[in-house]
Structures are given as C-alpha cells and as structure tokens.
Amino acid sequence: MKAGIVELGCGVRIAYDEVGSGKPVLLIHGLSESRGAWDEVTPSLARDHRVIRIDLPSHGASSDLPRGERLALAESIGEFVRRLELVSPHLIGHSLGGLLVTLLAAPVRAASVVNVDQPFFMGPFIALVRELEPRLRGSDFVAAMNEMTDRMGGHRVTSRVHDELRQYRAKARQDFVLSLWRPLLTQDEQAVTAMVEPHLKQIRCPYLALHGEEPGAAYREWLTRVVPTAEIEVWDGFGHWLHRVDPERFATRIRDFLGSAAVS
C-alpha cells in the first residue's frame, strides 16, 4: 500500500494511502475516526479498483483545518481530488463522510456515491446532541462521545472495533466537533435539511444510501424525489457502523453496486 501527503493551497495537509488499480474509489471516514476505519473492506474493494483512503483534515495524520465546517471540509477534499487527478471517482463515505460525498458528488463529477448511514432528516440525532451538549462542552466531552457511540449502535460491533471507536473519541478535537455541530445546536431539523437539499438536487449519478435502521417512509419518499437516482437499502438492526458489523457483506454489496454503476 502506497502512502503520501497532499499539500493543499490553503496550507492543509491531507494524509492518504492507496492500493489496487482501476477506476478510483475514494473512501471517507466518519467524524473523529481515520482512514483505518476502512481496513476490513479495503482488500476486497482493491481487487478491481484503485482505492484511495484519506484522513480528513483535523483527523488522523492530516493537519488541522482552521474552520470546522462541512463546506470547508468538502472544499478541501475537492481540491485533494483535483491534485490527484481522480477522474469521475466513486465516492464512499460513512456518517460525516456520507454528508461529504453527497456535497462532492456534483463538483467532482462522481461516477457513483455510497452514503453509509447519514440520513438528512436529522431530528433524532439533533435531539441526542442537544441532550449531551452540556457534557460535550465540558470536561466530560470524551465520555459523552462514547455514550453517543453506544447509543447509536456501537455496541453491535466486535469488542476490538468497539475499543477502536473509543480510542478515536479519546483523540477527537473538542473545538472542531462543536464547530461542526453548531448548526445542529442552533437550527431546527428543517433548516438543517434545507442546507443539504440543493446539493442533493445536483446529483445525477447512481446514489446508494445504506442504513443500519429504517429511516421511515417519509424520508424514503423525500430522498428518491430529490435524487431520482437514489436507492435506499436498510440492514435493519445493524446500527450506525454497519460496514464494521459485517464487513464482508458490505464489501460484496459495494462491489456489486460499483459494477452496476459502471455500466449505467
């Protein structure tokens, strides 16, 4: 596996690695995690694709991003894609990564998008963040993040992965997390959804939304109306980290989706 650093124009350095050859697949991890979160599925995806995995800015071995904002993150990744000259990459993102691949789909002319458990009707998550807000802002930040992990299905993964998730939380930048979640603390669900909808409407490529819990009929109707190419698939009971609960099933499903996207 080849590893490297890309220096962006804003001075941010993005650490990445890549393996395999063929059509590029960019993997983007969730909040406070790192590219190692894809370890279990990378070998399978690399059989017939060039798999590129990044550490988001302010995560892992990448340098800090001055602004903890979704658009600033997306812009940095878009520049990374241009620097590596990735032509029409497949984009796969989990959680925060699912939001970012959605924002990037049109600007980088993605061949396809896989959004792993990032719904855009965020009422339950907004309620959870607001419930834990006093602890998230104080010295109990890491414990609150760990509680959030367990309540979102972190207990469904193996003990090894569960420990890994807790290690990620211990290294999370409190200021960055709170900055990124500012809209969830200051706006209602409809306003948060409205921030994403214009980006969704620009998507023309195949779009797979994988969820570990049923998002509901209203969400299904809304997403498939806003993104006519969207397919919603639920692995009920798997929780937020479904790609880590059953990585073999996940890798197989993704390879099938990428294959069908290539001929659509």
Image: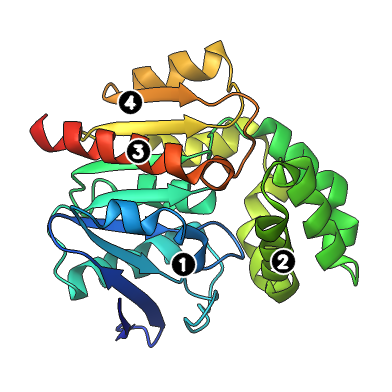
In x, y percent, where is residue 56?
46, 69
- Crowd around label 4: few <14 · some 14–19 · many ≥20 (10 Å): many
How far apart in space, not on screen, are marks 1 and 4 (Cα)? 26 Å
Q: Amino acid at mark 4?
A: Ala
Q: Which quarter of the image is occupied by the C terminus?
A: top left
- What residue do we see at 37% from left, 19% from top? 224
Q: Amino acid at mark 1?
A: Arg
Of labels 1 and 4, earlier in sequence is 1
Residue 43: image quadrant is: bottom left
In front: label 1 or label 3: 3
- Judged from the image, the secondary structure of the residue bearing numbered disc 2 is helix
Residue 23: image quadrant is: bottom left
In front: label 2 or label 3: 3
- What residue do we see at 58% from left, 30% from top? 121
- Give the number of marks: 4
- What residue do we see at 21% from left, 47% from top? 110
Q: Amino acid at mark 3?
A: Thr
- Judged from the image, the secondary structure of the residue bearing numbered disc 4 is strand
Of labels 2 and 4, earlier in sequence is 2
Q: Give left or right: position of 214 versus 145.
A: left
Could you say which disc has been placed on residue 35 in the image? Answer: 1
Residue 249, relative to residue 163: is it above or below?
A: above
In x, y percent, where is residue 260?
18, 31
Q: Give left or right: position of 102 versus 122.
A: left
Residue at image mark 4: 230
Residue at image mark 3: 252
Could you say which disc has been placed on residue 154 in the image? Answer: none
In front: label 1 or label 4: 1
Residue at image mark 2: 169
